[in-house]
Image (cartoon, grey):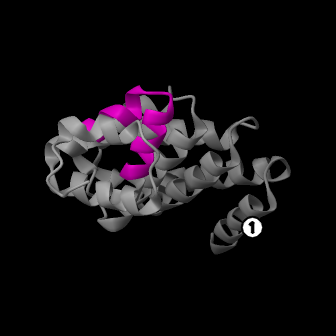
Amino acid sequence: MSSTTPSSDLLYFLQKGLSKVQVDELARLIRADRKAMKQMVEYATMYEDTIGMKASWILGAASVQEKNCAHRHLPQIIDRLGTIKTMGIKRELIKTMMFSNVMDCENLGTLVDTLFLFLRSTSEDISVSYNSMKLMNTIVKHIPELKEEFHDTLSHQMEYKSPTWRKCAQTILKKG
């Protein structure tokens, strides 16, 4: 895989097994190529299979490498997030948003509603709920009107979640 891999070849790499090193290399590539970033977002939000999972993993890695690199694609990610069934894809897309400035997104309200849905669901995967809690905590710092509802949600979900989730929630609640 070279740093000049055209975005049209991304699908080829998503159909193969990928190591962490390869994921990081593809993440660097899509950060440098707008067309490749757009294509990766489309794969992550449109495919509910291995291709979508790998694409979302690469997006998450790119966002860790460079905060806000997926910002221009957040509206598309947010619009599709609530309809995605694959927990790994949801987890990685929320992770992508955790490293992005979601506060100026035109569909921030949709994101907030989706995150509350994930937090309140007793059947949602714990990693999706955990990442939702962390992203929602960031949003609440900018929109204090949501704080009471967020804290109530955390309190009511304690008995259904894992010890790690509860510890994070308790920390958020203590900080007020």
Task: Point out the image quarter for the N terminus.
Answer: bottom left
Do we see residue 107 in this rendering? no
Say whether residue 29 is visible.
Answer: yes
Can residue 106 be found in the magenta stretch?
A: no
The x and y percentages for residue 148 are: 62, 53
User: Looking at the magenta stretch, what is its main secondary structure?
Assistant: helix
Residue 23 falls left or right of residue 106: right
Q: Residue at x 39, y 42 (%)?
A: 55
Q: Could you tell me which residue is drawn at 50 percent across and 25 percent down? A: 83
Q: Quadrant of the C terminus?
A: bottom right
- Residue 27 location, quadrant: bottom left
Horizontal arrangement in the rendering, residue 107 relative to residue 164 (left or right): left
Instruction: Give the percent coordinates (x, y) of residue 74.
Output: 31, 43
Q: Which residue is mark 1?
A: 167
Q: Residue furthest bottom?
A: 175
Q: Residue at x 56, y 42 (%)?
A: 88
Please report the bounds of the magenta region as a residue range: 39-59
Is residue 43 within the magenta segment?
yes
Question: Going 54% across and 47% down the picture, which residue do you hit?
Answer: 91
Name the residue type under label 1: Lys
Dot 1: within a 10 Å radius of its alpha carbon, few (fewer than 14), some, or many (20 or more) residues?
A: few
